[in-house]
Structures are given as C-alpha cells and as structure tokens.
Image: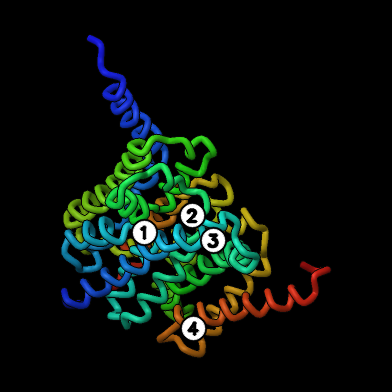
Amino acid sequence: MPDAGYLIAAVAIAVIVTWTLRAVPFVVLSPLRSSPPLIAYLNTAMPMGVMVILATYTLRAFSPYVPGKAWPTVLALAVTVALHLWRRNVLLSILAGTAVHVALASTVFAPP
Amino acid sequence: MPTSPSESSRTNDLALALKDSGSVGLGAFPMGVAFGVLVVHSGLRWWWASVFSGFIYAGSLEFLLLGLVLATAPLASIAVTAFLVNFRHIFYSLSFPLHRVHGPLAKAYSTFALSDEAYAVTASAAAQRFARRRILWLQVFIHLYWAGGATTGALLGSVIPASVTGLDFAVTALFTVLAIDALRARRDIRTAVLAAGCALIARCVFPGQLLLVAFVLFTGALLTRYALVRKKPEHA
C-alpha cells in the first residue's frame, strides 16, 4: 500500500498539471480565439487516440492463458461495447459492463 | 412582498445554475459513486475518494491515477499521464465565458473547476452572457455532484463484502466507451488503429512503462503525420 507522503505528492502533481492546463490557455490562447493549425489538428486526433491507449493500458494484465480472469474481461467488454453501440448511454454501458464483470469474477470465475 | 431587483436576480441565478447543472449531475453523481467504491476496494481509506475528487476534480484522470498510485508509479509518469489525459482542457479556454467572471479568486476557482461537464454546460452561445454568479454556482454544483458522489460511494463501499471483486472493470468500460464516442464523432479509424498499435508495441517492448512509451510513440506518430500532410497540401 502506498504511503501517505507519496499519495499526497501524486495528488499535488495531478492538481498542478490539471489546473495549469485549465488556466494558462486563457492567457496564452484566448487573445487568439482561433487555434493555430497544429493545435487544431492535435485537438481532433489526440482525444480518441488517448482514450484507445488508456483502454489498452487498463487491460495490460490480460492474458488468454489465465481463463478464469480472461473470460469475465472478454464477456464484460463485449457487453459494454454492444450496449454502447446500441443505446449510446455512457452511464448505462459502464454500469452494465461492470455489473457483468463483478458478477462473473465474484461467482462462476471466483478464485478458489 | 416586493424584493429588490438585485436580490431577485441573485435567487434567479442560483435557480438557473441548478437547472443548468442538473442534466450533467445525473451522470456525474453515479460515476462519482463508482469511483468512491473503487477507492475503498483498492484498500485506500474512504477520505482519499474525497481528496481525489475534490482537489484533482478530473474524473478520467482520477480513475487512472488510482491504478498508478497502487502500483507506486514514478511521479514523472503521473505528471506525463495527467498532462496527456487532460491536454484537451486547453481548448476549453477558447469558448468558456471567463470574461464574465470577475475577481481573482472567482477566476481562480472558475479555471480550477473547468471540468468537461462545466465546459459542456457553458458551450452554448447563450452562455457568453451568463451572469457571474450563475457561472460560478453551476461550477460549484457540478463539483459537488462529483465529490459528493465519490464520498458517498467510498462510505457505501466499506459495506460491500471483499468477496465481491472485479469493480476495477469500470475503468476499462469508461475508456472503451469514451473511445467509441470519440470514434463516432470523428470517424477516424486510422488514428484509432495507430493509437492501438502504439499501445501494443509499448505493451510488448516496455510492459513496465506502457503508458509513457505509448503516449510518446503516439504523439511522435501524429506530429510526423502532420508534417507529411503539410508538405503535400493537396492531401490536407
């Protein structure tokens, strides 16, 4: 378990970086009120790519050779994607996918 | 009983802010609850959920940060992750009506609490004429929905037995859903494949530093593609 000092430092860094990204552009970008081409390009391409990388990152421990852990992940992911393509409701997709994962991982595929 | 104009407009601003923030509150509160439950199930004390949600106040980064701190990731990785995950916020300055919010303290809070939800609620053209109090109150309300949800979830989470596992899938589901939404908005399959490729290369070559390596590869690839496209304006 991480110690309190490390946790406080981690939170402080996250706060400083996030607040800087939210506040500084008002000084730097606002006078322009129209973004330069490179910024505009990154704005369209970055968000999706970042989400794809983050989703992959959360699945880094996935291994098909550990079926007890792999099956709940595969099935819950299928439910999340299918439900989201169908209903387009962020909250519903997340809650349903997580419910399926918790149900499978805690019962049928529970560690002995 | 007649009220002074300023008094009635004050109450009105509060009511309008409550109404503005209501729709996003329906989403922010339950997501906060999910985050709070995850915090206590990760083994952290319940009040860390309040600290994360109240001070960082950037939902997707908080979910991610939870995993990073549990793995005691280097602080430099946390800084890079925070920068890349929240990079999108720099574009919010282009339309958020900060010019309506006077006073250094109010401006400080308004930029601090400029979350995705606060941006979404003030993205309309009408918001450019919102009163100062209305903007500040709607930001306070959204902040409270999220932090209140996280604290509620953390307190409820202690009641859920330890045999219930697998809640961390909420993070995977969150980013999967956000990726699908982004893909639906842009229809840019090539960028998605590029990002997935960078993540898989990083996963195979530097599994310990997946996130950092994948982000560097992806940013490098985007800049390279941008430079190539600019050289050939007919394809731009």
Give the amino acid type for the residue marked by disc 4 in the picture.
Answer: Val
Query: What is the x, y in percent for residue B169?
Result: 39, 63
Left-right relation of B204 to A108: right
| Residue B155, image x, y percentages | 18, 53
Q: Which mark is residue B213?
A: 4
Q: Do circles 2 and 1 both sit on a common chain?
A: yes
Residue corresponding to mark 3? B179
Neighbourhood count class around disc 2 (C-alpha, 10 Å): few under 14, some 14–19, many 20 upward: many
Helix, strand or loop at label 1? It is loop
Badge 4 density bin: few <14, some 14–19, many ≥20, Cα 10 Å: some
Q: Does the rendering let one see residue B212?
A: yes
Within 10 Å of disc 3 (Cα), the crowding (few <14, some 14-19, many 20+) is many
Nearest-to-viewer mark from 2 and 4 = 2
Going by the numbered disc 2, the residue's amino acid type is: Tyr
Q: Which residue bears the numbered disc 2?
A: B92
| Residue that badge 1 annotates | B58
